[in-house]
Amino acid sequence: MDHQTMYYQKRAGEYEQIYQKPERQADLQQLKAYLSRQWMGKHIVEIGCGTGYWTEILARHCALVTATDIHQEVIEQAKLKAYPRQNVQFEIMDFYHPERRQPRLEGLFGGFVWSHVPLQGLRDFLLLCLDQIEAGAELIFMDNQYVEGSSSPIHRTDEHGNTCQLRTLKSGETFEIIKNFPDKISVQQSISDLCTDFEWLELKYFWAAKFKKPA
């Protein structure tokens, strides 16, 4: 198990504290409103669902959400959320080694996943995402902006250009993780020859990008 995987496995019980920062609440409400307008009545896959914070919102509007994560610990936390429509199914899945879906699904969501993908593996990651959805389906990714004083400081930049942060759990254990902060241009360039219909939502603390698998 790599350092980053171990960190998220151990962080399961305290993960959602990141959504409690007072200065980020207005942005979070905008993201929730934005997400609520997507994929009405469709069956989508969520990669890296974590503790289900965004799964719960997706489930209010989608016909079915297949929520996936590599960690059983966070899946168990996600199952405790409220899904009154009984329209969420959970899977243990590594998004670097997904099973090919037949039939492919109608959309893909990745909340706070993009920033943890190493730059040298980003293209392969995107190709794997595209392989899970049908032609013409939309992908949406949401992630953090770097804001001095609110974001964890950048600890170092590695030889590939990935920025890394030090994260300390309540237990006192400290982990170094990759946390990249791409801008609109870099995200658009990374998908320019793979997808169409690029859209960008920029907020102070977060961003969202939507694009489409070619028909």
Image: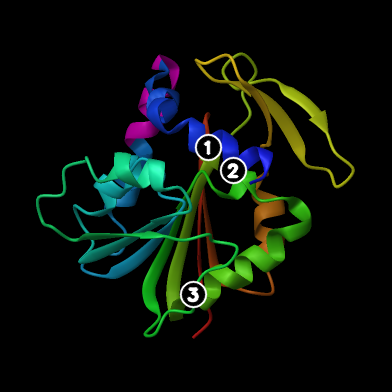
Q: Residue lying at the far left in this picture: please name it.
A: 84
Residue 28 magenta = yes
Expressed as whole percent of the image width and height from the top left, the position of residue 185 reads 70, 52
Query: Is residue 207 rendered to the left or right of residue 24?
Result: right
For disc 3, the neighbor class at 10 Å (few under 14, some 14 to 19, many from 20) is: few
Q: CA distance from mark 3 to mark 1?
A: 22 Å
Expressed as whole percent of the image width and height from the top left, the position of residue 209 reads 52, 54
Which residue is the site of mark 3? 99
Residue 206 visible: yes
For disc 1, the neighbor class at 10 Å (few under 14, some 14 to 19, many from 20) is: some
Expressed as whole percent of the image width and height from the top left, the position of residue 160 reads 85, 47
Which residue is the site of mark 1? 8
Against 173, is 29 above or below? below
Q: CA distance from mark 3 to mark 2?
A: 19 Å
The amino acid beneath tag 3 is Glu
Residue 203 visible: no
Mark 1 vs 2: CB contact within 8 A: yes
**Kind of element beneath mark 3:** loop
Q: Earlier in the sequence, mark 3 or mark 1?
A: 1
Magenta segment, which residues? 22-29
Expressed as whole percent of the image width and height from the top left, the position of residue 53 reads 33, 40
**Kind of element beneath mark 1:** helix
The amino acid beneath tag 1 is Tyr
